[in-house]
Every structure is written in structure tokens, then in C-alpha cells.
Amino acid sequence: MRTLLILRHAHSDWKRGQLDDHNRPLNSRGRREALRVAKKLENAEVFPELILSSTAQRARNTAKAVAQALGPEVTLRLEASLYLATPKEIVTVLCDIRSPVSRQVLVVGHNPGLEELVFILTGHKEYLLTASLARIELPISSWANLCFGTNGSLRELWFPKRFSELS
């Protein structure tokens, strides 16, 4: 059994119109959301061993905040292919995980790819707001076994506005 955590990046700063999409940072709300995500994971006793993040600044900053809050045993790996990735590209990155230790993996990325992946793996069509977090249980013994035919279970869906009341 493997646990896939899917996190849409936290709220980004649209006021810096001169920056291209890839370089858009988090705004103050996004920084608070990222810390709430980490607190929610900690309170739920869900500790990913590996965080895979898009290289976009808003995703990278979200992932770093979560990794730092969860502690030094969390490995953060930036993946350029996760920037605006399709479900197929996300699954390809996950299938390349070779560490048997990584039973719980957090992917930080973007819509629509993340929403589509949740649907493909669980059959649930969910709208992921910024900083929304889905927890999917997958009946696989290795990440290399993950495919579009894997029938996962959507265990929880956390939305940022509810983190403060759940934490």
C-alpha cells in the first residue's frame, strides 16, 4: 500500500505582473496556507517521506514550507517536468521513485493536471483550490506499479479555509 498526497500550490502573488508564470511567488495568504498544510499533515499524523514539487516558484515555496515544518527526515525533490504537468507526466515521475522507504509521497503542482489525476486514480471529480490537499491510498507495493488502471481510494480532501478549524 502506498499513500499519494496531492497538493495544489498555495495562493500566488498576481500583483507582480512583470513576472512570467513560472516565477510568480506566493503572496502572504499563500505563505500562511503552506504552513497550515504542514500543520494539518502533522496533526493528522501523515508524514510524507518524499515531496516532489514543480519548479515553479509558487509550488517550490509551498513545498519548501511544508518540508521545513515537517522536519529534516522529509526529502524535497524539485522536478521540472511537474510544471503544468499532465496526469501522465505526474505518473511518470512517481514511477521513477526507487526508494522502498517512500511509502507516502506528496506531489506539489498545478491544475488541471492534479485534478485530472485525482479523477483518474479515484473516480472522484474534485475541484482543487489553491492549497487543497488530497490523500489517496493506492493498492500498490511499489511506485513502479502505478498506472492509470490503479484503483485508488480518496481518503480525505482538505481545503485551506478549513485547515484552521481542523488544526
Image (cartoon, rainbow, N blue to C red):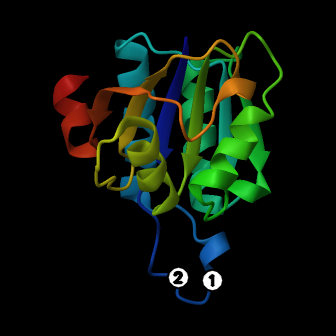
Q: Which mark is residue 5?
A: none
Which residue is located at x 65 percent, y 61 percent?
57
Q: Nearer the viewer, residue 55 or 94?
A: 94
Q: Which mark is residue 19?
A: 1
In this picture, is 136 found above or below 26? above
Other-residue count near label 1 (Cα within 10 Å), few / some / many at <14 / 14–19 / ≥20: few
Which residue is located at x 51 percent, y 58 percent?
113
Which residue is located at x 66 percent, y 18 percent?
49
For the C terminus, the quadrant is top left
In this picture, is 85 found above or below 159? below
Other-residue count near label 2 (Cα within 10 Å), few / some / many at <14 / 14–19 / ≥20: few
Instruction: Please state the horizontal and vertical placement of residue 154, each as a whole percent of the image.
Output: 34, 29
Picture quarter containing residue 11? bottom left
Q: Nearer the viewer, residue 161 or 114?
A: 114
Residue 39 visible to an observer of this rendering: no
Secondary structure, mark 1, is loop
Spot the residue most to the front. Answer: 149
Report the amino acid beneath label 2.
Arg
Q: CA distance from mark 1 to mark 2?
A: 6 Å
Which residue is located at x 63 percent, y 83 percent?
19
160 left or right, relative to 36 = left
Picture quarter containing residue 146? top right
Secondary structure, mark 2, is loop
Report the amino acid beneath label 1.
Leu
Picture quarter containing residue 83? bottom right
For the N terminus, the quadrant is top right
Disc 2 designates what residue? Answer: 16
19 left or right, relative to 135 = right
Residue 102 visible to an observer of this rendering: yes
